[in-house]
């Protein structure tokens, strides 16, 4: 659905890259970087705007983080994202090829960082300086509010470093995946998850005692096991 938008932008010379002369392949690199950064803002908005969170919530109630979670997006969120991604294309001036390449790389990245793959820790500590890794994104899927409101990058991890939203100092055994308001598998079946955005919303990260599900920051080595 986005290809016609990119074709229209190219035909009418709409967007930054259709106005500024940048040689190949640097124009494609610029397009991917801009697409990735603006996607960071969309992901952040999905967590901070209540209406958008209704549709992003189904992605986070999954109790087991694995590659299948990368496909667990509500059709409402996907529909809403079309408008935002169309705006990305029109502002950046993304070509059809650049759009295809970006979506291919992004899909591979999403499958990778949602997987439960365990990379050698020393290697992942280096890799996370450049791209989103499974341990980094696992923290984002934590049931602690201050951790799920972090690590919003989708491909390049630099955006979280720049905005101070990178959290790495949480050991994997300490993380519980999911949302506290939906702790039971019977509550997150496909049928119930599809209806989640249209139901009265729970206090997703509030515990039974009324407090918020938070974890106090602890000084640890970056990206512990």
Image (cartoon, rainbow, N blue to C red):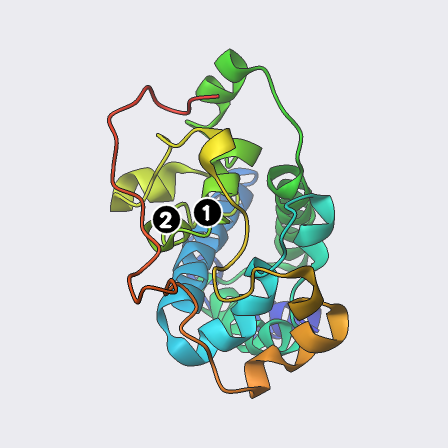
Q: Give SS at disc 2.
A: loop
Drawn side of residue 1 relative to residue 216, left or right: right
Image location of residue 62, percent across then percent down:
63, 57
Local crowd size for mark 1, using a 10 Å CA cut-off: few (<14), some (14–19), many (≥20): many
Q: Earlier in the sequence, mark 1 or mark 2?
A: 1
Does residue 164 lie above or below 43 as drawn?
above
Q: Which residue is pictured at 49% across the width and 70% down the height? A: 90
What is the tally of numbered marks visible in this picture?
Answer: 2
Rounded to the nearest angstrom, the CA distance separating label 1 from label 2 is 6 Å
Quickly name the residue at label 1: 140
Please name whichever residue, 68 or 78, is drawn nearer the observer in this view of the structure. Answer: 68
Drawn side of residue 158 relative to residue 58, left or right: left
Quickly name the residue at label 2: 150
Residue most toward the top?
122
If the image is split into quadrants, where does the N terminus sit?
Answer: bottom right
Does residue 133 lie above or below 215 as drawn?
above
Q: Which residue is pictured at 56% across the width and 38% down the height? A: 25
Q: Which residue is pictured at 47% across the width and 47% down the height? A: 142
Please name whichever residue, 132 or 177, is drawn nearer the observer in this view of the structure. Answer: 177
Q: Which residue is pictured at 67% across the width and 52% down the height? A: 70
Drawn side of residue 212 relative to residue 103, left or right: left
Q: Give SS at disc 1.
A: helix
Q: Are marks 1 and 2 in contact (CB under 8 Å)?
A: yes
Image location of residue 134, percent across then percent down:
57, 35
């Amino acid at each position: 659905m986005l290809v016609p938008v990119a074709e229209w932008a190219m035909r009418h010379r709409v967007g930054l890259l259709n106005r500024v002369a940048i040689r190949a392949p640097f124009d494609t690199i610029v397009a991917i970087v801009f697409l990735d950064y603006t996607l960071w803002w969309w992901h952040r908005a999905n967590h901070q705007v209540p209406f958008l969170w209704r549709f992003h919530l189904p992605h986070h109630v999954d109790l087991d983080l694995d590659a299948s979670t990368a496909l667990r997006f509500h059709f409402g969120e996907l529909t809403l994202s079309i408008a935002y991604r169309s705006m990305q294309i029109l502002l950046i001036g993304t070509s059809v090829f650049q759009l295809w390449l970006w979506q291919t790389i992004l899909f591979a990245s999403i499958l990778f960082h949602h997987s439960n793959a365990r990379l050698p820790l020393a290697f992942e500590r280096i890799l996370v300086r450049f791209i989103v890794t499974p341990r980094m994104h696992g923290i984002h899927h934590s049931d602690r509010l201050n951790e799920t409101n972090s690590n919003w990058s989708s491909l390049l991890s630099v955006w979280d470093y720049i905005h101070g939203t990178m959290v790495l100092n949480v050991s994997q055994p300490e993380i519980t995946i999911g949302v506290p308001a939906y702790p039971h598998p019977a509550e997150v079946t496909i049928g119930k998850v599809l209806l989640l955005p249209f139901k009265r919303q729970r206090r997703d990260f509030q515990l039974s005692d009324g407090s918020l599900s938070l974890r106090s920051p602890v000084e640890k080595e970056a990206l512990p096991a």
